[in-house]
Amino acid sequence: MKIVELQVNGNKHRVEVDDEQSLLSVLRDDLDLTGTKYGCGEGQCGACTVLLDGQPTRSCRMPAVNVGSKPITTIEDLEQNGRLHPLQQAFLDHGAMQCGYCISGMLMSGAGLLKKNPQPTEAEILRAMEGNICRCGTYPRIVAAIKQAASGRVAQKGGGK
């Protein structure tokens, strides 16, 4: 076991981990940040996506001991001062959530894209979202929501449905 210091959502946390313990496990079990979901455990579905130093990262495959001092952002940190992140609002506006299980990973991948490229093309959105699986099939709504967040506009009631 090792003591590591993680910077999560702007706060430092000292946690005891073993060499194989995933970042996902530390976030959920040790820090009680349960918005990040366990899906496949193999880094293929995207449900566990967090931002590691601004880059979308599959936390189920990332050993916590390898994170170092890189800042980690989870879904719990997207909302700021009681206001939804524009991407969260756009997902609501477009009805992009059905069961909701994939949504935290989708939002984190989308937020990572918009941080790196605030005006992505549809092709860039599709490429950035590869590997984020939605079993409910709301992909067109997800893409529309990311486009809306990039444009800075608010959808009209019922828009995108």
Image: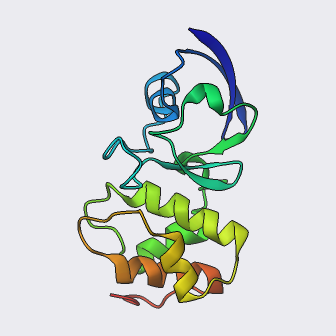
Identity of the residue drawn at 65% across and 42% down: 72
Of 82 and 105, the residue lying toward us: 105
The picture places residue 101, in percent across and down from the top left corner, at 31, 54
**Outermost residue toward the top?**
1
Q: Residue 2 sits in which quadrant?
A: top right
The picture places residue 102, in percent across and down from the top left corner, at 36, 58
**Outermost residue toward the right?**
69
The picture places residue 129, in percent across and down from the top left corner, at 48, 70
Of 80 and 28, the residue lying toward us: 28
Identity of the residue drawn at 72% across and 41% down: 71
Q: How is the image coloured?
A: rainbow
Q: Quadrant of the N terminus?
A: top right
Q: Quadrant of the C terminus?
A: bottom left
- In the displayed structure image, the side of residue 153 where residue 129 appears, left or right: left
- In the displayed structure image, the side of residue 75 where residue 103 appears, left or right: left
The picture places residue 91, in percent across and down from the top left corner, at 44, 72
Identity of the residue drawn at 71% across and 68% down: 116
Of 59 and 91, the residue lying toward us: 59
In the image, is residue 83 above or below residue 151? above
- Number of marks in the rendered image: 0
In the image, is residue 117 above or below residue 55? below
